[in-house]
Structures are given as structure tokens and as C-alpha cells.
Amino acid sequence: MRLSVIIKTLNEQANIERAIRSALDAVAAVGSGEVIVADSKSTDRTCEIAAQFPVRIVQLSHAEDRCCGVGAQLGYAVAQGEYLYILDGDMTFEPGFVEAAIAALEQDSGLAGVGGQVREMNLDNEEFVNRAQRRLAHFEPGQVDRLDMGGLYRRSALAQVGYFTNQNLHAYEEFELAARLASAGWRLRRLDHPGICHYGHTETSYRLLAKRWTSRYAWGCGELLRQSLGKPHLSFVLTRLHVYRLYFAVLVWCFAAATFVLLAAVNGTPLLALAGLGMLALPVLLMSLRRKSLARGLYAVSAWGVFSAGLLAGLLAKPRREPTDSVRCVSLK
């Protein structure tokens, strides 16, 4: 079989039909393949809608296993394609991308995966506005160190590194995959070709930020670090994921500010308290000036705080399962 498209879903009833139709078109364009809906125990009509199409549906058996890293691994367990694509339920393929990606993999035997250009369709949320404006290096055409937002992977490369995505990770699952592939000598590439449209979350910025914490998405960088300890790809993780420097700096800064406030309370020194509060306010001021907006500056610093706390929480969290363990699931179709 040529292609397996794995669509990760959790309560995607508003998007799933669009994603499936896009995936079926991609399979038809390359001649043979399958579409697998890997569902994280949705509580809406996602699976009911998906069942109306010629797709395979597998679903987690236990809701507590939900995380970003489990979806691709769930689909990988039943996939048969020579090439595999991770597609989120709120994404669609751009015409011609899968054919171009397969051609690139066939022309270069050292490539493990290929991505395309990402078009953000929802720019009402601060997170997605920032993502669209920053133009990070790994979203530029050429050789990249990760394929965030999905990619087409060579099955033989995935088999060599043991598993598709780590089912303990609530985020950074594609980065962890990239780290393992790089350690095994494989390369990744992003084409200068439209790849996918991402419709994203429709929540307000702060509601989404709260969701990032309650879903443990914010814990992902800490979980990644813990899962990488003692592994050959640890140096790749520490040197390539630059948010660690930011989040550790935020933690040190907050600790120093809290120390000033605590000393002020113990010694009755108002100046120390003002110094501590000033330290907390300074990043907001600087980011507001940089982004020319108090609201955007405040949101940026709030996000730093949430994800820095998540770094600690994820680092301390005990992994639930071994990455190579079978995913607990049932087949619905």
C-alpha cells in the first residue's frame, strides 16, 4: 500500500468531514492507500460522522491515555502504507502536496520525512497570529530539524527508530520524533509547496491558554526532557529546543522576584517588595513595547508563565507507559 493518512481526532465533529474528504483525495491522487481516523475517545459525533466514509476508525479504550503523542502511534499500529502522514482533525491537505512529498522521498533515500508550507486559517487567536508572523526556521523551505504541524514519513525510518510518536507526551511529539530520527542519521525537509491548511482553535486567547494547562499540553516540554534523559538524542533536544532557555530564565526570574517579596514580608522592608513587584512587571512592559500593544505584551508574558510552570510539572510527572507499549484501543470500523 502506497500511503496511510492518519487523522488524529478528539471532538472534531465540526472539522472531521473536511479532513477526511481531503485525505481521501490525497490517497486517490497517489493511486493506493488508506485513511485511518485515530480517535482519542471523542464525546461528540466525530466517529459517527467519520463512519459515513470509507475509512478505518480506531479509538482509545481509556480516556486517561489522551495526549498529543498517542494519536499518531494509535494509527501507526494498524497502518499499512509505505509512507505515513500525520494529519490533525482540524487540517486539510493542499492540492498536489502529497504527490510532491512522495516524489521528494523517492529522490532522496536519506530523507525520513517531508513537510510543506502551513496556512493558518484562524487568525483571531493571539497564539496563531504569533505563529503566522514569526516565520520560524523550521517552517522555511529546505532541510529542517523538525516537521511541526505534520509531515509525510517513510515507514522504514520509523521502524528503525522504534515507534512513531511517544504516547507519554502531551506536546512536542513531532520534535521528539525528529530528535530520534536525527540521532539515527536521517534528515527532514520542508518543501516550498503549500502543504496543509490549519483551521485551529476558535477559543479566545486566554481560554485557549487555560486549556493548554488543563489538557497538560503546557507540560509537554518538561515531559520531553524527562523522556530524553539518558537517551542518545538528549543533546539534540537541549540544543535545538530554544524554549528551554526562555522557560528556565522565567523560572529563575520569578524565583528571584518571589524571594524579594518574601524577604520584604519577613523584614518589613517595602523597598524589597517593590523591587520584587517591579521585576514581575518589567517583562510585561518590555514585551508591550516590543509588540506595540499592552494586551499582546501581557498575553506573551502570561503564556511564558504557564509554559514555564508546565516545564516543571512535566519534568516531575511520572511517565504512564513505555513508548513502545501497545496503545490500548478498540477498532470501531
Image (cartoon, helix red, strand yellow):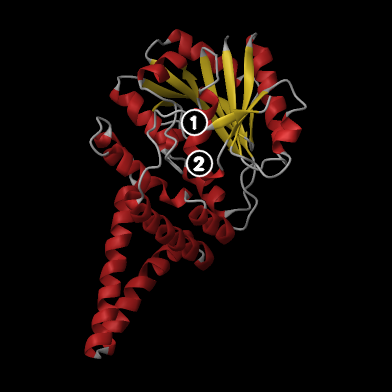
Q: Residue at x 51, y 23 (%)?
A: 76
Mark 1 belongs to which amino acid? Val
Q: Residue at x 51, y 61 (%)?
A: 296
Tell me: 230 left or right of 50.
Answer: left
Residue 17: horizontal and vertical position, in percent? Answer: 73, 32
Numbered-mark total: 2
Mark 2 belongs to which amino acid? Asp
Q: Could you say which quadrant of the image residue 325 lies in?
A: top left
Residue 313: horizontal and vertical position, in percent? Answer: 37, 55
2 and 1 marks in contact (CB < 8 Å): yes
The one of 213 and 101 positioned closer to us in this rendering: 213
Q: Is residue 120 above or below residue 113?
A: below
Earlier along the polypeptide chain: callout 2 or callout 1?
A: 2
Q: Which mark identifies residue 327? A: 1
Q: Which residue is disc 2 drawn over? A: 65
Q: Residue at x 28, y 89 (%)?
A: 270
Q: Secondary structure at mark 1?
A: loop
Residue 290 seen in this snapshot: no
